[in-house]
Amino acid sequence: TKDDQGKPLFNKGHVTFDAVFSSLVVIFQQAVTIIVVAIPEGLPLAVTLTLAFSMKRMVKENALVRRLSACETMGSVTAICTDKTGTLTLNQMKVTEFWVGTDQPRGATAIAGSVVSLLCQGAGLNTTGSVYKPDNVSPPEITGSPTEKALLLWAVADLGMDADALKRSCKVLHVEAFNSDKKRSGVMIKDNATGAVVAHWKGAAEMVLANCSMYMDTDGAARELGAEQRRNLEKVINDMAVGSLRCIAFAYKQVDSTTEQSKIDNDGLTLLGFVGLKDPCRPEVKAAIEACTKAGVAVKMVTGDNILTARAIAKECGIISSNDPSGIVIEGHEFRAMSPEQQLEIVDRIHVMARSLPLDKLALVQRLKQKGHVVAVTGDGTNDAPALKEADVGLSMGVQGTEVAKESSDIIILNDNFDTVVTATRWGRCVYNNIQKFIQFQLTVNVAALVINFVSAITTGKMPLTTVQLLWVNLIMDTMGALALATDTPTKALMDRPPIGRTAPLISNAMWRNLAAQAAFQIAVLLALQYRGRDVFGTDEKGNGTMIFNAF
């Protein structure tokens, strides 16, 4: 209001509207500033920076991350279900033993020609691999899976197989591809010269042997497979398995050429022989598994191999140790036959699952998750996709893995090496550790600024830290802190502690203690400057505000 001369009235006890509005604006500005300070808006940036930096560094260590959050999840993994072939082993198969019947011949010269011919047909035609020999001087080029390559190389080098001549002399009538349920593959061929039709089978020794009623001797005579002979042959298989050899059997059957065959007959077979393939463990695997055990991560091997072979490889790798007699080695069909409650009861103690199907691996992952484990799974085949999807982190193989497996996974192991899985775990723990460091740093700053401004606003009506100053701290200084903490690299000490559980709080008790102590120290110093700084240092209000900001 104004008087008759147009001058404002400043009566005692009255204020102008402009002054009231200005005070309200200041109060609103202070309130908004306090709210901005209370929210750690730098946290999403810090998390993204940490994950992106780790993802880039992990590629250099042969781990290609397809899903960003998988970096952090790897740090919480408590159980790893891993394949054997190619992951724990070198995937470089080589035939080291050869048996015909119950005899172990020194070479092809010690076997009848008819047996050698049948073995060449079984190895060279019942296969998904191929042999290409450009000339008589150069060694043959062999393609196919590691098992097929090893068998073809053995047939060429030890049996003297001529792959081109063999294909010209026979016609393939029917093929039955390898089946993970039956663990064998078959082919029906017709000899172009004689017109004879023969069915050849190749696969897991104990499964092929179960369908045999005769066996071939080294002299080429077919003998009846009695109970004693069967026990002797089973002993040969077991001895190979105990020696960590994969045992493959060859069998055949003469087929009536006048009868129409819609499928290959697998009953009443005649056993030709066994071969034992050795796939050595990777030299670094034992140390990697020891590191996992020390870090509280359980490693479980899931394989399609014979239980004795699986046990031998597990001992060689360190998955089974004499220090843990409670560890269980089980076959897939046994685990499958159990009720879900029984599976839950033993799942923690399972170290090796042999003769497993893809659905057994999926069931194992599901039971482990029900027990509260954070589960990582390695896989390379199309049928591993369900387990890779179900796991908290799916790790596919970059060399031997199929496209379906890679699409179903979160991380691709570019060198198919289990040691890289351990490296990914170490980086995962580093990511989680870096996020915790930043949260502790950010919350300490926010709590200190919040308390200082709130207490000062209540007691003096003024905030020592202005809006611009707090925005500077939040947007600039916190971003620099996030960059520094996000790019911290992993240390060996990260693998000396147990994994962070699925239900563990993000802010631990130690973090709360550090946060409270450091925030209390900052608040005490800054409030002392706020209330006594002008008197002690002889500064004006602006100088004291600058001093508080610089100290903060």
Image (cartoon, rainbow, N blue to C red):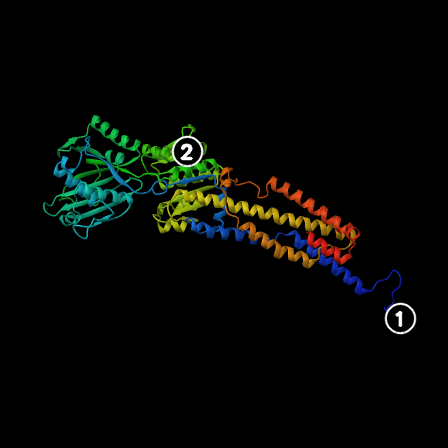
User: Where is residue 220 drawn, in percent x and y?
Assistant: 13, 35
Please tell me the numbered disc located at residue 546: none
Examine the image and state in which quarter residue 318 appears: top left
Instruction: State the residue lying farthest toward the bottom.
Output: 5
- The residue wearing badge 2 is 350
Q: Residue furthest top?
A: 228
As measured in the structure, the alpha-carbon distance from the residue carrying label 2 to the one carrying label 1 is 95 Å
Horizontal relation, residue 238 to residue 159: left or right:
right
Residue 277, image x and y in percent? 27, 38
What's the residue at 66%, 53% (across, down)?
Answer: 37
Q: Residue furthest left?
A: 194
**Is residue 261 in view from this perspective?**
no
The first of marks 2 and 1 along the sequence is 1
Tell me residue 282's x, y (percent).
35, 40
Q: Which residue is mark 1?
A: 3
Q: Quadrant of the N terminus?
A: bottom right
Q: Please state if 518 lies on the left or on the right of 530 as rendered.
A: left
Note whether residue 488 is visible: yes
Depth order, front residue of 210/423: 423
Crowding at label 1, few (<14), some or many (≥20) Cα neighbours within 10 Å? few
Looking at the rendered structure, the kind of residue marked 2 is Ile
Residue found 34% across the figure and 43% down from its top: 86
